[in-house]
Image: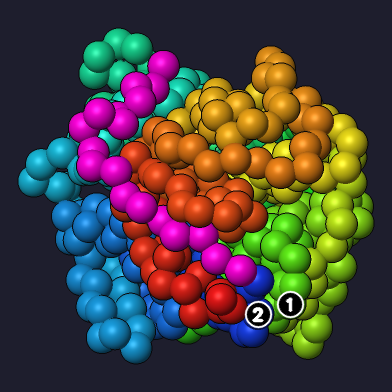
Amino acid sequence: MFQNNCAKISHQHIKNHKSLVGEITVPGDKSISHRSIMFGALASGKTRVTNFLRGADCLATIDCFRKLGIGIEDTVDEIIVNGKGLYGLKSPSGMLDVKNSGTTMRLLSGILAGQSFESEITGDASIQKRPMKRIMDPLKAMGADITSINDNNCAPLKIRGGDLKGIEYDSPVSSAQVKSCVLLAGMYADSPTTLTEPVVSRNHTEMMLTGFGADLKVDHRSVTIFPDPKLEAQDIAVAGDISSAAYFIAGALLVPGSELLIRNVGVNPTRDGIIQVAKAMGGNISLENQRIVSGEPVADILVKYSKLHGIRIEKDIIPTLIDELPVIAVMAALAEGQTVIADAAELKVKESDRIMAITQNLTDMGGKVVPTDDGMIIDGVEELKSSVVKCYNDHRIAMSFYVAGLTLPGTMLFDNANCVDISYPTFFSDFGNIIKK
Ligand code: S3P
């Protein structure tokens, strides 16, 4: 499904290193950064955002909202969103381009479904292959006129909204992007909208929209939103992204002699599966200084080198660590015994087919992995060997296999290490700062 772009991009050498020691602060959370722009745009007044993630995905969200008539300033210290209220967006002059960002694509489609103007929205080659039927179905049921321009249930999409009706929707997938899309459209509907998902996915939309003044009711796996809220601008301090912290957690667990304190990380229970899994695999990891920042649980994470063992990872924990499974697979590849990852078919429709990308790269490094329909089975080996990492233009594959490389003598090659810019532009220099040679 996704082409290996190895031939097109010059190889980049990444030197490997010794133990990881010291303190690190990771950049702001990607999911919260996106939502701070979107919800700020739909609120009245100035929303001020500190520790905003200036990764390519979140910058694409800023671009799209500027095209929709929202003034957004970057003062270096903060991002200021000059919100225009629920009905203040203007018709964009051209196609909205989300680049590589699935969150922008799906959440913004929900907002566009509530607008009376017509818009077209697309993204890069990866986005144009990712499934959009999962949002088209509920938006159509609400009365939006939404079509896939190439008639393949993928982007580009043409959306003409307005006159939406509230629905009760049983989502076939646990996906915060689908949930958020439907809830955002639900703000423009004529009656309440309820979405039920098989397993609870990340709940930033529910928490943040409530903070902006929306009326939401959460009942186990169901969320109801009441229409026509009056959203008010907020000050948001974005916590560090646990999905970025995951690479430091895995690195410190795997590289002998490591001891790291990762400061100011969001540890929302709908996102903290990596910590549960690290503990279950025998990892020495603890949460210090737990607190609430801008409504979200935050902690400093202390992690030390540990001998890991294999476990089963399946069912309800999967949505809480879906983005961390590539680096968890690297941990499993070097753990004692077998790790089974199941109920994670969603891996196939991320920025790359991650079951394929993980299998390919681990196999190239001498790991033992068997792909399955909904995950993989990994038998731990004593050590991996150097290889050329095929990134598939997927930031999380590149970062996960950089961590694998930290366990090796010699150097690793990457076909496109620059793709880390999607969620973590300072990834390599941040690792450079805590590596003890
Ligand atoms: C996200 C939801 C998840 C996650 C993505 C960010 C969000 O996707 O993988 O990186 O911010 O809502 P799904 O909703 O498709 O699982």
Callout 1 amino acid: Glu
Q: Is residue 251 above or below residue 160?
A: below
> Secondary structure of the magenta portion, mostly?
loop
Q: Classify residue 374 by image quadrant.
A: top right
Between 36 and 251, the one nearer to me in the picture = 251
Q: Is residue 9 magenta?
A: yes
Report which residue position mark 1 lands on: 259
Q: Quadrant of the N terminus?
A: top left
Q: What residue lies at 71% left-to-right and 44% top-to-bottom?
A: 383
Q: What residue lies at 43% left-to-right and 65% top-to-bottom?
A: 428
The answer, for residue 211, to whether it is visible in the render is: no
Near mark 2 (Cα within 10 A), the count class, few <14, some 14-19 or many ≥20, is: some
Q: CA distance from mark 1 to mark 2?
A: 5 Å
Q: Quadrant of the C terminus?
A: bottom right
Decide if ligand 1 comes within 8 Å of the CB at mark 1.
no
Q: Is residue 23 magenta?
A: no
Whole-percent x and y of residue 113?
A: 36, 38
> On the rendered structure, is 41 left or right of 398?
left
Whole-percent x and y of residue 434?
A: 56, 78
Callout 2 amino acid: Val
Q: Which element carries disc 1, helix, strand or loop?
A: strand
The mark nearer the N terminus, 1 or 2, is 2
Q: What residue lies at 91% left-to-right and 52% top-to-bottom?
A: 280
Q: Are marks 1 and 2 in contact (CB under 8 Å)?
A: yes
> On the rendered structure, is 282 left or right of 230?
right
Between 277 and 133, the one nearer to me in the picture = 277
Near mark 1 (Cα within 10 A), the count class, few <14, some 14-19 or many ≥20, is: many
Report which residue position mark 2 lands on: 21
